[in-house]
Image: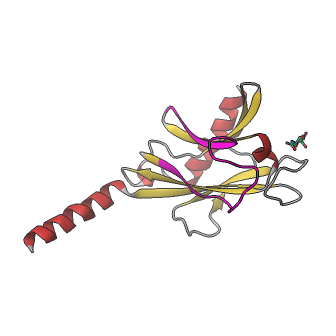
Amino acid sequence: MIGKVVLFGVAALFVVAFAHPQYRTLKCTTPDGKLKAGKDRARCNMIIKDSETEKPGRPAAEGEGCFSETHNGEERVYCALICPEAHTVFNAHIEQGHRACFNFFSYQLEKRENDWYIWRSGKCLNSTVTLDVGCKFDKPFNELVANDNEIFARLRARARKALA
Ligand SMILES: *[C@@H]1O[C@H](CO)[C@@H](O)[C@H](O)[C@H]1NC(C)=O
């Protein structure tokens, strides 16, 4: 009995210590609204959420935190997730049967320095898609980034750095 209580206590501590999640949604829309590549580039914005179910979340301005790079002659558009020092970052959800965005081919999570990014390339850049990402931290997120103003300031700073 005592053993079980102790075990439960340890498990609870583990959850408290390591499960400080945040959620990000990169919402991209094209004029035709299709889950496959069209003739237009998608317009995207990052949405900041403290829980997976937070609605509607706190949206950044269009394109904020995003920048382009070329890899092997192909354009990639990176968008900053502002999940500094996250110990785990994972794809939480994408529309079922998406026809242009495929993990590891036309979109992917990537860690750089202390933060994380999601990039899109090829046909994914021209499709409507909602990419939900989860980030997990060792400590409460507000000990890492004070508030929304700070999150949005970091997004703007990331775009400026990319232009420099
Ligand atoms: C994506 O959109 C751009 C800009 O409208 C267009 O030039 C390009 O051909 C499109 N790419 C695809 C794969 O449809």
Magenta stretch contains residue 8:
no
Q: Quadrant of the C terminus?
A: top right
Determine whether 121 is above or below 72 in the image: below
For the rendered model, the colour scheme is: secondary structure
Span colored in magenta: 89-113
On screen, residue 157 above or below 103? above
Residue 117 shows in this picture: yes
Q: Is residue 99 left or right of residue 90?
A: right
Residue 58 location in percent, x, y?
63, 61
Side of 106 relative to 29 (left or right):
left
Q: Quadrant of residue 86?
A: top left
In the visual, does 15 lie left or right of 88? left
In percent of width and height, residue 25 lies at 63, 56
Tell me the residue at 44%/48% (across/down): 88
Residue 107 magenta: yes
Residue found at the very far bottom of the displayed protein: 1
Q: Quadrant of ligand 1?
A: top right
